Image (tube, grey):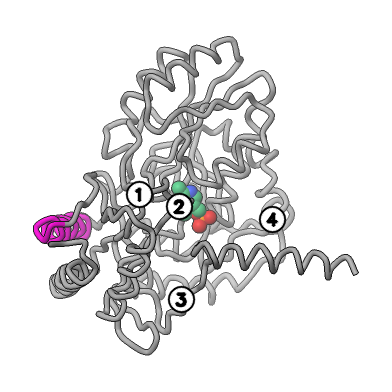
Amino acid sequence: MPSDRLNAHLRTQLDDLRAKGLYKAERRIESPQRAGIVVNGREAVNFCANNYLGLANHPDVVAAAAEGLKAWGYGLSSVRFICGTQDIHKRAEQQVARFFRKADSILYISCFDANGGLFEPLLTEEDAILSDELNHASIIDGVRLCKAKRFRYRHNDLADLRAKLEEAKDCRFRMVFTDSVFSMDGDLAKLPDICDLADRYDALVGIDDCHATGHLGATGRGAAEELGVLDRIDVITGTLGKTLGGASGGFTAASAEVVDWLRNRSRPYLFSNSVPPALVVAGMKALELVDAAGELRTRLKANTARLRAGLEGAGFVVKPGPTPILPVMLGDAAVATRMADELLRRGVYVIGFSYPVVPQGQARIRIQVSAAHTDGQLDQAITAFTEVGRLLGVLK
Ligand SMILES: *Cc1c(COP(=O)(O)O)cnc(C)c1O
């Protein structure tokens, strides 16, 4: 049987993953998502969710989802253009557009789909996409689906980007596209410099703002606002699955023409279902909360500073950066895994990341801080990290 051969082949490959310590096992959370979760029957402080403002399961968001469900139903059984567009979808798109000060926006089931359906409709063989080498998998896949010439520039390397723009200067359109926050290192794309270069080479600039929307920038408009270039960015993709309530749904905000063209040609939009009403209504509520979340953003900054200072004070090497992502650098993959296990035993839930997710020899534990963490939870983490750091010989 052909399936026997394939299954045998996969068993070998899976064994190989296990032998290399690369096999991904899922940990089961026995509670809703929040700052304190239940894992293996025990309370643990959660430092792995993209729940930066604590809006996942915020009572107002949950209530909005329930209202949406009641008022607009569970599902639409249709893609948008056949019979899957309700009043709320249009209102949500207007709200997202206004939020980013763009002319229009288009909703997708996920940001993975927003990125997957962005490039192919807009750019052809005559054009060029310039993409940061550390961009998210969904951008890489989206670029692969597109016939434009591809230029991968070294991470945040303006000289390399400039060389690639030079190479692409005879193309019809050039688009530079980058994650605005890189999730493994917590660093920002150098957007002001990228915009300057793009101006010089007559290129468009697009960002994926998934790890920034809602919590970065004075009013939560994300990394471009934080860096003062929101109005210079042509295309913004993002998700409702992180800061904005944490369920799912993605979007692309851009000019009226770009969005209109995507509605006509973007394949994940044309051939995949409409976002369920409950998520649309809850997403609008999350955006509204973000607008008024100045205090939460201040709290998130204070929490991040407190945890960083505590860990650095204990002797850990924490990569510098302006985001609530704190990469605690350990180097060795086995140490990172062991450390995460020991921390969980002490009620602190973090994950170790190693090759191939991060470069060889740069294994780390990535902490994601939330505005919902209490001082007590942060201090518990500092104590546990210090204890385990000594136990494993990471700290003297
Ligand atoms: C999370 C993430 C995505 C995927 O978002 P979904 O809405 O979950 O599909 C895309 N890009 C980046 C940079 C992300 O961090």
In the depicted view, which residue is nearer to us: 280 or 336?
336
Tell me which amino acid carries mark 4: Ser
Q: Residue at x 43, y 79 (%)?
A: 29
Asked if residue 240 lies left or right of residue 368, the reply is right
Q: Residue at x 57, y 46 (%)?
A: 114
Label 3, ligand 1: CB separation under 8 Å? no
Mark 1 and mark 4 in contact? Answer it, CB < 8 Å. no
Tell me which amino acid carries mark 2: Tyr
Mark 4 and mark 3 in contact? Answer it, CB < 8 Å. no
Asked if residue 88 lies left or right of residue 47, the reply is right
Q: Which residue is mark 2?
A: 355
Q: Which residue is mark 1?
A: 362
Task: Please state the extent of the stretch shown in magenta in the rendering.
Answer: 296-315
Q: What whole-number distance in Å separates the C-alpha atoms at marks 1 and 2?
A: 8 Å
| Horizontal and vertical percent position of residue 67 | 47, 74
Which structural element holds mark 4? loop
Q: Earlier in the sequence, mark 1 or mark 4?
A: 4
Circle 2 packing at 10 Å, graded few (<14), some (14-19), many (20+), is: some
Report the residue that reaches farthest toward the bottom.
Answer: 41
Which structural element holds mark 2? loop
Q: Is residue 49 visible?
A: no
Q: Which residue is mark 4?
A: 272
Which structural element holds mark 1? loop
Q: Earlier in the sequence, mark 4 or mark 3?
A: 3
Mark 1 and mark 2 in contact? Answer it, CB < 8 Å. yes
In the picture, the disc for residue 27 is: 3
Q: Earlier in the sequence, mark 2 or mark 3?
A: 3
